[in-house]
Image (cartoon, rainbow, N blue to C red):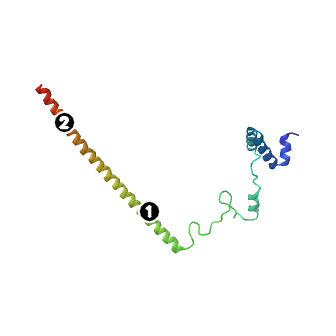
């Protein structure tokens, strides 16, 4: 009888103990044991475990997969109070409209800021170009006189 067969007789606790001892003695042994347990399927939960027990007692509502413990109300997506649902829909619609208006305002504000920065840049450039042209003209005159 091999070590694997002997550990399988004792079940998961024996494998976990071996893995922990492997980590304590020399960490690659523990890592190797963990890898073998995952590769061989010894770490998987059986499908006939706790979920099957809950389903057999009818506690999951016949659902499986994510959210199986939650039973949605008959008013899925609503609170059950029509007045509140109408108020919520109106409020959400109004907030969406306000958000769109605010985004439009921000876009206009950015365009105005960009235009002001561009106009300032062009004014500075025109001022610098004008000064450069005058300096160049003065130098040309000096060259002609010499």
Judge from the rendering whether residue 89 lies leftward or rightward of residue 137; answer left or right: right
Identify the mark at residue 96; answer none if there is no mark.
1
Q: Quadrant of residue 20?
A: top right
At x 37%, y 56%, the residue is 106
Name the residue rendered at 51%, 74% in the picture: 83
Residue 37 versus residue 68 in the image, above or below: above
Q: Rate crowding at label 1 as few (under 14), some (14 to 19) or many (20 or more) other CA atoms within 10 Å.
A: few
Indicate the position of residue 87 as horizontal and vertical percent values. Answer: 48, 71
- Residue position for label 2: 133
Residue drawn at the location 77% of the way across and 44% of the way down: 19
Residue 64 to residue 139: above or below: below
For the N terminus, the image quarter is top right
Residue most extreme to the right: 1
Q: Residue furthest left?
A: 145
In front: 117, or 88?
117
- The mark total stands at 2
- Residue 41 lies left or right of residue 143; in this view the side is right
Position of the C terminus by quadrant: top left
The residues bearing labels 2 and 1 have C-alpha atoms spaced at a distance of 55 Å
Query: Looking at this rendering, what residue extends furthest in the top direction?
Result: 146
């Amino acid at each position: 009888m091999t070590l694997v067969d002997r550990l399988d007789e004792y079940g998961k606790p024996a494998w976990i103990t071996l893995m922990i001892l492997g980590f304590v003695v020399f960490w690659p042994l523990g890592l190797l044991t963990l890898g073998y347990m995952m590769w061989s399927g010894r770490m998987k939960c059986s499908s006939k475990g706790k979920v099957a027990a809950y389903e057999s007692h009818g506690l999951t509502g016949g659902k499986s997969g994510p959210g199986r413990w939650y039973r949605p109300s008959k008013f899925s997506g609503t609170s059950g109070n029509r007045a509140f649902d109408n108020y919520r829909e109106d409020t959400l619609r109004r907030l969406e409209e306000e958000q769109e208006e605010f985004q439009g305002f921000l876009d206009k504000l950015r365009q105005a800021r960009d235009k002001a920065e561009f106009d300032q840049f062009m004014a500075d450039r025109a001022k610098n170009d004008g000064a450069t042209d005058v300096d160049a003209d003065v130098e040309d005159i000096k060259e002609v006189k010499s």
